[in-house]
Image: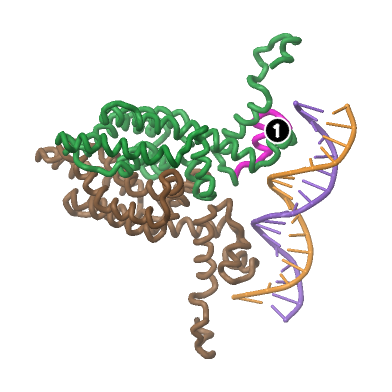
Chain colours: A green, B brown, C purple, D orange
DNA sequence: GTCTATAACAGGATAGAC
DNA sequence: GTCTATCCTGTTATAGAC
């Protein structure tokens, strides 16, 4: 904030420039309401600026929602793929992915519901997940990642320590066990009568439960 | 259709009465657009009737969407709970649940995305899942179901054939592995470059894959 | 860059004829 | 029961002053 150099600095001054504040507010509102349910007015209020400013910076609701979704995708997919493609034993991989996902989603439990809603109502938006990988030729990367994982599994099978499993099912099973419970949160809270603390405790248990479950499932 | 008794029966006559046709159309539209994204006009068009008729039969969009959601919940939860609570060996339970879920969701792959979207944007609607259990005191049923499952698991543990697992995690793991891939469908199709047939084949593989994976995970 | 005021329109709901 | 026509509110988007 350049202008603050000529003013008395204030601890009450909002952080970040206006554009960033709008983006942050949009992030929060879109995540809890979904794109169709969100209102530009609510975003403006939450950012503490006038509605017209949203259009000044982002032109339309459509573009603003794309900016938010893209940002979410960028924080979601690349770190996960890096873990899956890293050069460590497969048991270590499982543990790292589970811990990273549960840590990350505990911080923003609305993420799975938001992303699934968006993709459901707007499937073509899925391709933004790919452009979220900045400067990468995804169609070239993906198959080789899958093949490396297939090789690693095959080595375990040959050594007699693992049962065979297709790498696609390996990945889908792993992220299902981590992510789906957050998408189920409202239902678990009602159907199993959980309160917020109960849910947090439940997720905390899963940090060890899912790792143990998954590693046992891999055994020969 | 009483009036057809006085007319020449026609194979071109739409099936079902008007109210049912509207409900069916609403079901299709809400499932693909979500409640906020759906338009009363689109439902009317799909049902082949006038927009005003929707209000004649269902009073408001709100009520129509509740009718659809409730119907979906009723087809979703009770059969699952019956399987989980049935009096068969636990391995058999796992197999039955997986097959029932995958069969059911292959018929309506939009279901998981729809339900998750609804619950995300309208968490209080989760209680309709409970009223979907017609005439059952859910708060009394749920704990005893969980306890019966806990007992069954404990027996396996005692016999030395199973490792211990909390019944809540047992259930969440099982339905995660079955349901989540459908919620991921748009992403899998894009990120893994699947077409519709590829996805169907992938689900077909999971009928055996998930059962094998899960049963191995339960082993001592 | 930021605001106020207002245009422009989409979409849910109702009145009333048939 | 079903339609046409219309109302009316909420929401996105823009014009224009400061």
Q: Quadrant of residue A57?
A: top right
> Residue A214 at what x, y percent from top left?
26, 36
Write the residue at 39% across / 42% down. Answer: A188
Q: Image check: B155 left or right of A22?
A: left
Q: Residue at x 42, y 33 (%)?
A: A196
Please state which of residues B133 and B78 is positioned toward the viewer in this rendering. B78
Q: Main secondary structure of the magenta part?
A: helix
Give how far across and how far down residue C14 sits, in percent: 70, 63
Asked whether A31 or A70 is in front, the reply is: A70
Badge 1 density bin: few <14, some 14–19, many ≥20, Cα 10 Å: some
Q: Mark 1 = which residue?
A: A57
Report the chain holding disc 1. Answer: A
Q: Quadrant of residue A19?
A: top right
Query: Which percent across, then down, holds residue B15?
Result: 49, 76
Residue numbers of the magenta segment: A37-50
Q: Is residue B153 depicted above or below B135 in this figure?
A: above
User: Is residue B148 among the parts visible in the rendering?
Assistant: no
């Amino acid at each position: 904030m350049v202008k603050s150099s000529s003013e008395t600095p204030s601890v009450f001054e909002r952080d970040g420039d206006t554009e960033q504040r709008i983006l942050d507010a949009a992030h929060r509102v879109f995540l809890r309401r979904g794109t169709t349910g969100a209102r530009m007015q609510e975003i403006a209020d939450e950012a503490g600026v006038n509605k017209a400013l949203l259009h000044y910076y982002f032109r339309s609701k459509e573009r603003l929602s794309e900016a938010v979704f893209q940002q979410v995708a960028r924080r979601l997919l690349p770190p996960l793929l890096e873990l899956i493609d890293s050069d460590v034993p497969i048991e270590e991989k499982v543990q790292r992915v589970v811990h990273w996902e549960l840590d990350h989603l505990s911080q923003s439990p609305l993420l799975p519901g938001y992303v699934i809603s968006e993709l459901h109502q707007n499937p073509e938006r899925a391709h933004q997940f790919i452009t979220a990988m900045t400067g990468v030729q995804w169609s070239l990367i993906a198959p080789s990642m899958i093949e490396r994982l297939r090789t690693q599994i095959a080595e375990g099978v040959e050594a007699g320590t693992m049962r065979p499993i297709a790498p696609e099912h390996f990945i889908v099973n792993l992220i299902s066990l981590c992510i789906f419970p957050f998408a189920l949160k409202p239902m678990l809270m009602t159907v199993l009568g959980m309160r917020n603390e109960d849910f947090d405790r439940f997720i905390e248990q899963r940090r060890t439960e899912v790792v143990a479950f998954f590693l046992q499932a891999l055994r020969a």
